[in-house]
Amino acid sequence: MLLPQVGGLLINHGVPARALVTAGLLLVAAGNAWLTTLRPGLGVAGLLGPLATLGTGIGLMIGITDAQAVNRVAQERIGMATGLLNTVRAGGGTLATTLFGTALATVLQARTDDPARAARILAGSLAGPGRAVEAAWLTGAWQVALWGASGVCAVAAPAVWALLSPPRPVRPAAAAAPAAPRPRPSALP
């Protein structure tokens, strides 16, 4: 709740929006990578650092992305741009969640070689003598999916940096120099 306001204050103090958005993406990448240290029994203290890193990255970006998107359209189209932005954000979030879940399920199913067992583990039902092995499989699948999310954010950061670069000033076309008059052929006497 506080970090979008911090992002706005930083922008008002001259920090470029592209720097904050890029830094936010890199923080999200780092937070996801840090979460790969997950292991059974990690506890709240072990989650605090990576989740705070993720939250900081997302918090810095959330308000800035809206402003950057809306500032790039004509004034009379701001309503359309805002509607499209919210649609893309909701659809993108749904797609990202679906892709993450699919990656998690696919990796877990490959490790168990049993779709029913993978579904049971994904549902959180770790029971019986194989509980430790199943927990390790689930942890490994989470780590693969988190590395994937981290990689996507790390690759997106320089792309966003480039896309949010200030427009290059348009140089006026070089004025065509008036053509020098052609010498007239001299008339022979």
Image (cartoon, rainbow, N blue to C red):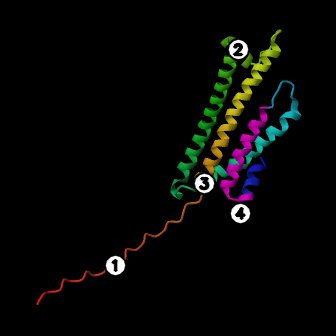
Q: Nearer the viewer, mark 1 or mark 2?
A: 1
Residue that sits furthest to the front in the current view? 189
- The secondary element bearing badge 1 is classed as loop
Magenta span contains residue 79: no
Sequence-first tag of 2 and 3: 2
The residue indicated by pointer 3 is 164
Residue that sits furthest to the bottom in the current view? 189
Q: Quadrant of the C terminus?
A: bottom left
- The secondary element bearing badge 2 is classed as helix
Residue 13 seen in the current view: yes
Mark 1 residue crowding within 10 angstroms, few (<14) / some (14–19) / many (20+): few
Sequence-first tag of 3 and 4: 4
Residue pictured at 25% horizontal, 80% vertical: 182
- The secondary element bearing badge 4 is classed as loop
- The secondary element bearing badge 3 is classed as loop
Sequence-first tag of 1 and 4: 4
Q: Nearer the viewer, mark 3 or mark 1?
A: 1
Whole-Å distance between the Cαs marked 1 and 2? 79 Å
Q: Which mark is residue 112?
A: 2
Snapshot quadrant of residue 19: bottom right
Mark 3 residue crowding within 10 angstroms, few (<14) / some (14–19) / many (20+): some
The residue indicated by pointer 4 is 14
Residue 63 seen in the current view: no
In the image, the segment drawn in magenta is 10-36
Q: Nearer the viewer, mark 2 or mark 4?
A: 2
Whole-Å distance between the Cαs marked 2 and 4? 52 Å
Whole-Å distance between the Cαs marked 3 and 1? 40 Å
User: Measured from the top left, where is residue 68 in percent x and y?
Assistant: 61, 53
Residues 20 and 179: in front is 179
